[in-house]
Amino acid sequence: DLGSEKVLENLSDLERLSINGINDQTFGNGFRSLSKLTYLNFHPCSITRIDNTTFDVFKKIQLTELILNCKIRYVEPGALNPFQSIERLDISKNFNVRISYLLQLLNGLMDRIVTSIDFSHNFRTIPAADVLLASQFAMIGAVCVKEVDLTRNQIISIQSGGINLMKHKNCLEKLILKENSIWGDRSLAIEMVKLVNLRWLDISNQATIHVKTNAYKNKTCLRRLDMTDTNYSSDRLTFAFQLPRNLQYIDASYLGVKDSGLVIEAIVEKLEVK
């Protein structure tokens, strides 16, 4: 077991703990004595599985920040349930697990108030991709979370309907989806207005589309969308949708629009929506 009582019983006043190099060992009862622990960081580590009993020894500890930069491949939905006071959750850089699979962990934090969830840079298997179903994307809203980071997870599609299913959608203030390969879904864009307290949205640097234009028939180049307020237009497409009323910052640069042959190259700061 990791964390024998003899080693940890004299560390009851410890508030921050970083551990590296561990694998799928069982957490010993010694961790129960760390009654003042608020910060727990596993980086780097070789943990490959997190089941519903993995963190049982932490049930009575008021942990507020958990970092797991490991090699997770297998998870169970209730694995995070012992963390009743978690405020910041970082499960990033686990290169062998799809975010669509990892999101089920939020079942263990259902209805909790959380400041930030970082699920970035997880799935790096090449060649491969990930698709988020509406029910999976909706798990973000199962928790009352202010900030969510899903950067660089090889997501190619997010099914529309997920925002409608979010129980705590009004809690979300910052959403980062940059550096994936998402083709813009018009239905999903229209749903964004329901994130009424969203202030920051970054969906930039998705896979770009190369198209042949009338002006350069023999050349392939990026086609640009001009953005004015909430209207996006070009010689081929006009697409207007309402943005969340409290949005202050949006980065949609290099965002491909599905079935349009267009790429948005635009960034708006301090956005004012009337």
Image (tube, grey):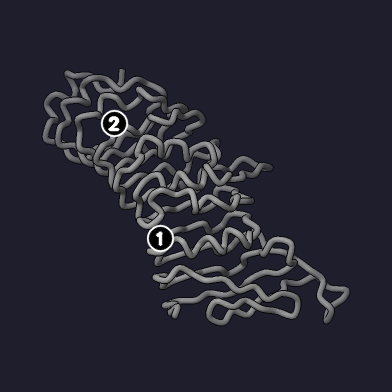
| Quadrant of residue 70 within the rendered picture | top left
Quarter of the image with the C terminus is: bottom left
Image position, residue 246 (x, y; %)? 39, 70
Residues at marks 1 and 2, CA–CA distance in whole angstroms: 26 Å
Who is closer to the viewer here, 44 or 202? 202
Q: Name the residue under label 1.
A: 174
| Quadrant of residue 186 within the rendered picture | bottom right
Specify which label sits upstream in the sequence, 1 or 2: 2
Who is closer to the viewer here, 17 or 229? 229
Q: How crowded is mark 1: few (under 14 residues within 10 Å), some or many (20 or more)?
A: many
Quarter of the image with the N terminus is: top left
Q: What element carries label 1?
A: strand
Image side of residue 168 versus residue 124, left or right: left
Who is closer to the viewer here, 2 or 89? 89
Image position, residue 189 (x, y; %)? 57, 63
What's under tag 2, amino acid-wise?
Answer: Pro
What's under tag 1, amino acid-wise?
Answer: Lys
Image side of residue 2 versus residue 204, left or right: left
The numbered disc on residue 82 is 2
Relative to 27, residue 227 above or below: below
Image position, residue 24 (x, y; %)? 41, 23
Question: Which residue is at a point 51% across and 30% down the rendered structure image?
Answer: 73
Image position, residue 206 (x, y; %)? 61, 60
Check if mark 1's residue and mark 2's residue have beta carbons within 8 Å. no
Looking at this view, name the residue that lies furthest to the right: 218
